Each structure stands twice: as C-alpha cells, then as structure tokens.
Image (spheres, grey):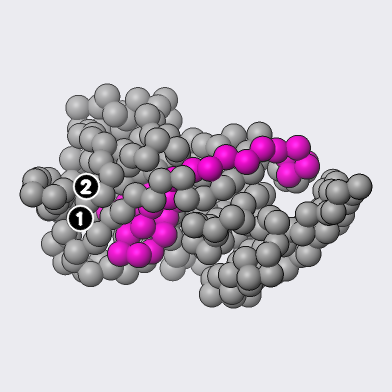
Amino acid sequence: MADKKKVRFIINPISGGKAKKDIPSLLNAHLDQSKFDMEITFSQSGNHAKELAKEAVELNKDLVVAVGGDGTLNIVASCLVHTNTPMGIIPLGSGNGFARALNIPMNTIAAIQLLNTGKSLCIDSGSANGTAFINVCGFGFDAYVSSKFAEAGTRGLKTYARISIKELNQYKPKEYKLVQGLEQQIHKAFVLAICNGPQYGNNAYIAPLAEFADAWFDITLLKQVSWTNFVGLSVDLFLRRIHQNKQTNTQRVKDLIVIQPEAGYVNIDGEPVWFDEQVSIKMHPKSLTIIVP
C-alpha cells in the first residue's frame, strides 16, 4: 500500500462569521483516512496562518488545505507559490470568489470529499510590490469598501452590501497612471481591478473572460458608478457581462505599474493592504497548484 499523504489543515476560526467547531469531526468523517495522514491546526491571526503554511512546506507536507475565505486562501497560497506543495480549499468565507471560480463546492462535506478524488491544476498568481495575490488586486472603490469592511464588527455579505450602499455616493473617481514599458495610459476610474480570476465573490463577475492559467491579467476599469447606473452595473456583474457595459474599459496585460494619486489601500484578494503611490504588478505563470474537481 502506498504511503499516506501528509496533509495540514489551516482553519481560520472567524472567517465569514461562520463557526468552525464542527470542522474536525467533519474531516474525521469524510476525509479518506486510508489516503491521508491528517493534521488540524487553527490559526490565531493572519501572521500565525502564514507561519503554519511556511512550516508545512518546510516539513514537506504533501498538501496544505486552507479552511476559510479569500483572505485566508491568500495567506496560505502566498507561502505555497513557487513550491511543489499544492493547496486544497474548504471555502467558508463571505464571498469565496476564488473557490467559486474554480468550481470548488460551497458545501463543506462536498469540499472535504473533493480532497479524496480531486485533481491538481497549476494556475498563475500575481504580486503587487511583492505581495502575492491569486484572484483580484483592486484599486478605488472596492479597496475603499474592503478597508471599511475590515473595520466592521460583523462579517458576511449583508455587511459588505450595507457598507457599499452607504459609501457609494461619497466616493469619487481617482486618476491612475498605468505604465507598461514605454507606454503610459491615464484613466480616471471609480474601480480599477486587475484580475487573475473572474469574480470578486458571490458570483459577481468583475472580469468574466479572465482565466487562471493563461498567463494574462484581465483589467476591468469602471469609469463612474452612481445611483443612476448602480442597478444596471450590478445586474451586469451577476450576469457576467460587465465587460460589455459602456462604463467599462477592459484590457489584458502581463506586468504593469499602477501609479495612484496618493498612498492608500489596495484590495488584495478581498483584504485591504496599504501601498505607496507606485505599485508594481507582476504575473507569475503556473506558480501555484490547486486541488480542483
């Protein structure tokens, strides 16, 4: 009989406002014990989750499974890019955009069972001034809302929607300079999203044509969002046609520099990260392995 694969589970106990106390018993019941030698850990903070993921690589674990939302996935994945250690996913966040786009089941038991039968897929990742991202790097309103969301006392879709609606008319478009080699573009944008994957989360598709393994970023630039076009833009997001809206400018890039009007928060896979004015975006093709259906 082949040796069991050594797998470490890294569980974020607070992601998505969902309790995780039942996860160990579900893992014991539905993970194939004949295939896996299981270790369950709970992260105490983002830095602790990073330590657990780095240690798993050093210990030559065969698989590291992130249990949480897009922020948790980002932390774990940032330690696994450019290694031979694959990442499994049990999505328990607010939006779960990365997992949804890869057809990872939202049902916890089904996501656990997928680890028994899933296949490996090598995908691209990105970095912003060296900070890894696997799904979306966003400037403008989505970064602003993510910073407010991080400060909120509650998590979940309702909280995110409430903050977005409250701040919609207060936020003003900003001017961004995009630099690719010797070429420069200047855009005034409400949202500037640099996408490795197609959706923010909850099936809101900000870059419907984006693919995880094509070695390109898809950029979606929303010029202006207000109450007069909010409903139409929202419908287009969920119907996967935002790239066809007249308020949208799209393009595909590999590496670029984004120059903001001032230092500020950038949305890195759903979490706000503070950056200086100049942000260097780099594509890292086929740099991360994920367990998928």
The disc at residue 257 is 1
The stretch of residues the image draws in magenta is: 113-139
Q: Is residue 167 left or right of residue 120?
A: left
User: Is residue 115 in the magenta section?
Assistant: yes
**What is the crowding at mark 2: few (fewer than 14 residues within 10 Å), some, or many (at least 20)?**
many
The main secondary structure of the magenta stretch is: strand
**Dividing the image into 4 quarters, which one contains the C terminus?**
top right
Q: Residue at x 17, y 60 (%)?
A: 260
Q: Is residue 24 left or right of residue 244?
A: right
Q: Based on the displayed image, in which of its 4 quarters is residue 67 positioned?
A: bottom right
Q: Residue at x 49, y 61 (%)?
A: 78
Q: Is residue 150 visible?
A: yes
- Mark 1 or mark 2, which is nearer the start of the sequence? 2
User: Is residue 29 in the magenta section?
Assistant: no
- Amino acid bearing label 2: Phe
Label 2 sits on residue: 190
Q: Residue at x 83, y 54 (%)?
A: 4
Q: Is residue 200 visible?
A: no
**x and y, in percent, of residue 139 in the image:** 27, 54
Q: CA distance from mark 2 to mark 1?
A: 18 Å
Q: Is residue 192 left or right of residue 1?
A: left
**x and y, in percent, of residue 200 in the image:** 43, 44
- Amino acid bearing label 1: Ile
